[in-house]
Image: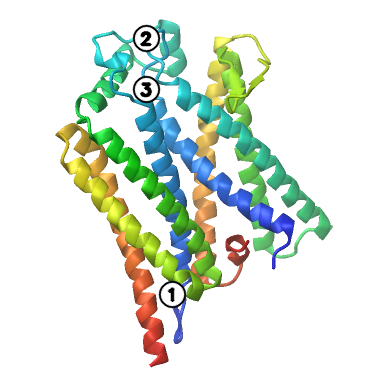
């Protein structure tokens, strides 16, 4: 039976997967909603939800990254197998991109002047004054890092499916909790 | 891809693809429920209020003035083409679909390591999902061309994905029975 940390890792992995796809899908349609004004407040709920889920994902990604790094450290040396080294690097790139997407999105939001209330209960402080050019810069970084993330996710899913179809037990632990 | 290794059938792919599509469907249905919660009938978009397209916002969003104005039309399309019964019915169907997708996700995971115990609940999940897809398709068919153009095709794709997985679960059953005989 998997231990508690393994179980938690598996649970967070799938929770994050659902939420990342949710964020991709919601961002595509919510940006087609009318721009915010006194009359039009359609964006309020989806944007707040987007930020809340993004911040939560950031915390989970940091946890998963810490578990991954400690696993690499425990090995104490680099794996001699090329494919194993590739897997480690792939996961690190994945976690780096997820955290980068979250940070760039949050900074873009901070520079836009819109406040963030975490899960409608905790007002997060504004880290910066409203600044249009920095908002655009971080918004662009958010956009392009998210495209890169989608590309890496496609590769990650492809490799996972490859192992599952070959039935080589590599990914079986991710379906056990 | 080796689905068959000698005489042993690798049925793991059924569980793995159930998990993958389960995740995508949970995300998809949550989005639909959110969309229905945001685009409410009786909102200001139904009246003739013009879009508020400030030049600085247009630069920030990388939008043309025309695009900004059409964003309001986007909402008007949704509202004008939805009969009064459409919103409550689709919300119910998408919630049912969300729950069934969660079941297919959980039992798909179990199917990878223990196909015997997960086969029956996975079968039930896909029967439900195929039924729900059919109902969403039928519901949307009864609306106008504007909504049909948005919903019909993705619903049809989901219907066939779930049909393929349902048939795969059923055929796994008959395969194992044949082996016993």
Residue B18 locus on image (x, y percent): 44, 60
Residue A163 lies, in percent from the top left, at 54, 66
Give the x, y percent position of residue B176: 41, 83
Label 2 element class: loop
Q: Secondary structure at mark 1?
A: loop
Please tell me whether residue B156 is drawn above or below residue A169 in the rendered image: above
Q: Nearer the viewer, mark 2 or mark 1?
A: 2
User: Is disc 3 in the same subunit as disc 1?
Assistant: no
Q: Residues within 10 Å of mark 3 (few under 14, many from 20)?
A: many
Residue A87's disc number: none
Q: Quadrant of residue B104?
A: bottom left
Chain name for mark 2: A
Quarter the C terminus of chain B occupies:
bottom left
Does B14 appear above or below B178? above
The secondary structure type at the circle numbered 3 is: loop
| Same subunit, tags 2 and 1 | no
Residue B161 is at least partly visible in this image: no
Q: Which chain is home to disc 3?
A: A
Distance between the alpha carbons at the discs numbered 2 and 1: 57 Å
Task: Residue under label 3, please give it.
Answer: A33
Ranked by sequence position, the earlier of labels 3 and 2 is 3
| A78 w.r.t. B65: above or below | below
Viewer-nearest residue: B35 or A92: B35
Give me the C-alpha separation between circle 3 and circle 1: 45 Å
| Label 3, label 2: how far apart the Cα atoms are | 13 Å
Q: Which residue is mark 1?
A: B3
Residue bearing mark 2: A39
Horizontal side of residue A102 vs B171, given as left or right:
right
């Amino acid at each position: 039976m998997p231990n508690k940390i393994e179980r938690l890792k598996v649970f967070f992995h799938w929770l994050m997967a659902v939420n990342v796809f949710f964020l991709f899908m919601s961002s595509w349609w919510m940006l087609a909603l009318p721009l915010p004004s006194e009359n039009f407040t359609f964006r309020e709920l989806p944007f707040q939800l987007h930020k809340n889920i993004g911040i939560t994902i950031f915390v989970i990604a940091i946890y998963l990254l810490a578990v991954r790094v400690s696993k690499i450290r425990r090995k104490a040396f680099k794996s001699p197998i090329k494919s194993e080294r590739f897997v480690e690097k792939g996961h690190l790139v994945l976690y780096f991109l997820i955290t980068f997407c979250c940070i760039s999105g949050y900074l873009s939001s901070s520079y836009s002047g819109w406040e963030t209330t975490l899960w409608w209960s905790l007002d997060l402080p504004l880290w910066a004054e409203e600044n249009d050019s920095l908002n655009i810069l971080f918004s662009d970084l958010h956009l392009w890092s998210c495209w890169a993330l989608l590309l890496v996710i496609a590769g990650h899913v492809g490799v996972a499916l490859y192992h599952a179809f070959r039935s080589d037990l590599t990914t079986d632990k991710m379906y056990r909790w | 891809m080796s689905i068959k290794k000698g005489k042993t059938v690798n049925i793991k792919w059924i569980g793995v693809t159930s998990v993958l599509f389960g995740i995508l469907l949970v995300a998809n249905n949550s989005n639909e429920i959110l969309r229905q919660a945001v685009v409410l009938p009786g909102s200001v978009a139904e009246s003739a209020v013009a879009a508020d397209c400030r030049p600085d916002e247009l630069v920030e969003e990388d939008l043309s003035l025309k695009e900004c104005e059409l964003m309001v039309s986007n909402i008007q399309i949704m509202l004008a083409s939805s009969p009064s019964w459409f919103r409550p019915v689709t919300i119910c169907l998408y919630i049912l679909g969300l729950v069934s997708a969660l079941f297919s996700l959980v039992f798909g995971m179990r199917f990878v390591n223990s196909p015997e115990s997960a086969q029956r609940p996975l079968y039930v999940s896909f029967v439900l999902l195929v039924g729900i897809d059919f109902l969403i398709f039928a519901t949307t068919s009864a609306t106008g061309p504007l909504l049909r153009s948005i919903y019909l095709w993705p619903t049809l794709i989901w219907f066939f994905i779930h049909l393929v997985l349902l048939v795969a679960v059923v055929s796994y059953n008959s395969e194992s029975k044949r082996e016993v005989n």
